[in-house]
Image (spheres, rainbow, N blue to C red):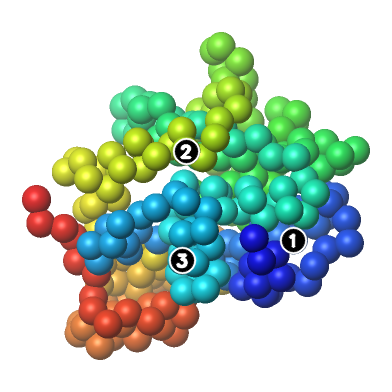
Amino acid sequence: MNVTAYLDRIGVPRPAAADAATLRALHRAHQTAVPFENLAIHLGERISLDPDDLFDKVVRRRRGGFCYELNGLFAVLLEELGYAVTRVGARVYGEHRLGPPFDHLALLVSAGRDGTWLVDVGFGRHSSYPLRLADRGEQPDPGGRFRLADADGGDLDVLRDGEPQYRIERTPRQLSDFAPTCWWQQTWPGSHFRRNPVCTRLDGDDRVTVSGRTLIRTSGSARAETALASDEQVLSAYRVHFGIELDRVPSPPQE
C-alpha cells in the first residue's frame, strides 16, 4: 500500500506512534474525508474486496464505499502504521431481529499500552472516535452516547443512545470471508443497499448526506432537507460535498 497517498486522502500527516491519540485522529479524519456510500450498486459497478481494487477506488478515484470496503481498507492502513488489527463479523439489528452473519465488518485494534478499541469507519452514522473495548460504561461521542454490552456466547452488542446497532462476534476473520455476503448485499432484491443511493460523511460535528434526490444536513437532533430537483443539482451535490465526479445520476437497479 502507498501509505503516504492514503494519508493524503484523509488529510493526516504520517504519525510518529501507533497509539490511541493517533488512532482517534485517523478515525475521525477518515469519516470526514471518505464517505460511506453505496453508489456502485446504483451505477452498475462491481464491488471488489481485493485490496488493490479498494485502494484504487477510495484513494486514487476518491470514492467511498460501504463497511466491507471502508473498514477492509482502513485495516490495512492501520497494520502498515504498526497497529494490531482483528477483523470481526457483526450482525446488524433490524426492526425485529438481527441480520445474518457477516452482515457487517468491524475492527478490533490494539494500540499497545493504550488498550484495544472498536474501530468502525464503515457504518454510516456512528461514533466519530473509536470506542474502548473493555469499557462497559457510557462513552460520550459527538455521534451520540455509546455503550458496549456483553451478549451471549462472548459476543458484544454496540448501542447508540440506548438503541442496539449491531452485535460483534469475537472470532478473527479475513476480508475474503465477507465476500459472499458482500455479493449478497449487492444482488439480493431485498437488500436495503439496493433501495436508494446514499452518500454521507462527517462535516465537523455535523453530517452531510445525499439520499436519493435529497440533500440532508444534520446537527445533533436538528435536520434540514433540500430537494434536488434536477440531475444537474444531484451531480453538483456529489461533487461539492463529497468530491465525487459522476457522469450520470445513480438510480436503483431494476429487478
Residue 94 visible, this angle: yes
Neighbour class for label 1 at 10 Å: few (<14), some, many (≥20)? some
Say left or right for 125 vs 111: left
Say left or right for 151 vs 136: left
Residue 30 lies in what quarter of the image?
A: bottom right
Residue 213 in the image: state x and y as whole percent: 25, 72
Residue, x 38% and y 78% (percent of image)? Answer: 238
Q: Nearer the viewer, mark 3 or mark 1?
A: 3
Q: CA distance from mark 3 to mark 1?
A: 22 Å
Q: Where does label 2 land, which residue? A: 176
| N-terminal-most mark, 1 or 2 | 1
Q: Where does label 3 land, which residue? A: 57
| N-terminal-most mark, 3 or 2 | 3
Secondary structure under badge 2? helix
| N-terminal-most mark, 3 or 1 | 1
Secondary structure under badge 1? helix
Residue, x 61% and y 73% (percent of image)? Answer: 9
Q: Name the residue type under label 3.
A: Lys
Residue 237 visible, this angle: no
Q: Nearer the viewer, residue 115 or 161?
A: 115
- Give the answer, above or below, for where 144 lies relative to 97: below
Say left or right for 147 vs 35: right
Q: Where does label 1 land, which residue? A: 25
Q: Name the residue type under label 2.
A: Ser
Q: Name the residue type under label 1.
A: Ala
Q: CA distance from mark 3 to mark 2?
A: 18 Å
Residue, x 21% and y 41% (percent of image)? Answer: 188
